[in-house]
Every structure is written in C-alpha cells, then in structure tokens.
Image (tube, helix red, strand yellow):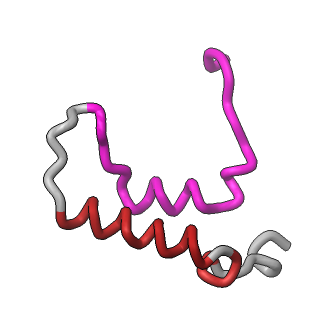
Amino acid sequence: MFLKNAQSFETMDSEVFALTNQELKRQEEGLELIASENYASPAVMQAQGSILTNKYAEGLPG
C-alpha cells in the first residue's frame, strides 16, 4: 500500500524538491571542513526514505 500510493517528491512539493537538489549540488561540489557534518551512504538514505521511516527506537537494546 505504501509504495502503491506513493507520489513523486517532485510532484508533491516542487519547492522542497528544488531545495533538495540545490543541497545535493552543494554537497557534491563543495568541501566541508566541519567535522560533525557526515555524509550518509546511498544505502542509508534509501532506507530512510522507505517504509522503515515509520519505525523508531528508544533506549537500550534488550
């Protein structure tokens, strides 16, 4: 159901889509010297944009 009803990000909010593309360009073309600014791998970004985003974790394992 989730994927069946999913709309294109560009279709849903073109302004946010444009801002996201600008940020992608900034990250690809710039050199960040801030140690705390880490880049997520494509696999992590894909997982964050999936049905798993509806889950959360709190506390310690076990």
Compare residues 47 and 39 and report the one nearer the observer. 39
| Residue that extends furthest to the front in the rendered view of this protein | 15
Residue 13 locus on image (x, y percent) = 65, 74
Q: Say how many tags the image has.
A: 0
Q: Quadrant of residue 11?
A: bottom right
- Determine whether 51 is above or below 62 in the image: below
- Determine whether 62 is above or below 28 in the image: above
Compare residues 1 and 30 and report the one nearer the observer. 30
Compare residues 28 and 62 and report the one nearer the observer. 28
Question: Is 7 situated left or right of 24 in this image?
Answer: right
Residue 48 locus on image (x, y percent) = 57, 54
Residue 25 locus on image (x, y percent) = 29, 69
* Quarter the N terminus occupies: bottom right
Question: Is 21 situated left or right of 32 in this image?
Answer: right
Q: Quadrant of residue 51?
A: bottom right
Q: What residue appears at the point 43 percent right and 59 percent down from the top-left corner?
A: 43
Question: Is 23 situated left or right of 58 in this image?
Answer: left
Q: What residue appears at the point 55 percent right and 57 percent down from the top-left corner?
A: 47
Q: Is residue 50 magenta?
A: yes
- Determine whether 30 is above or below 35 in the image: below
Task: Write the start and end of the magenta stretch as one range.
Answer: 36-62
* Quarter the C terminus occupies: top right
Q: What residue appears at the point 37 percent right and 50 percent down from the top-left corner?
A: 40
- Determine whether 59 is above or below 56 in the image: above
Residue 50 locus on image (x, y percent) = 64, 61
Q: What residue appears at the point 72 percent right and 80 percent down from the top-left corner?
A: 7
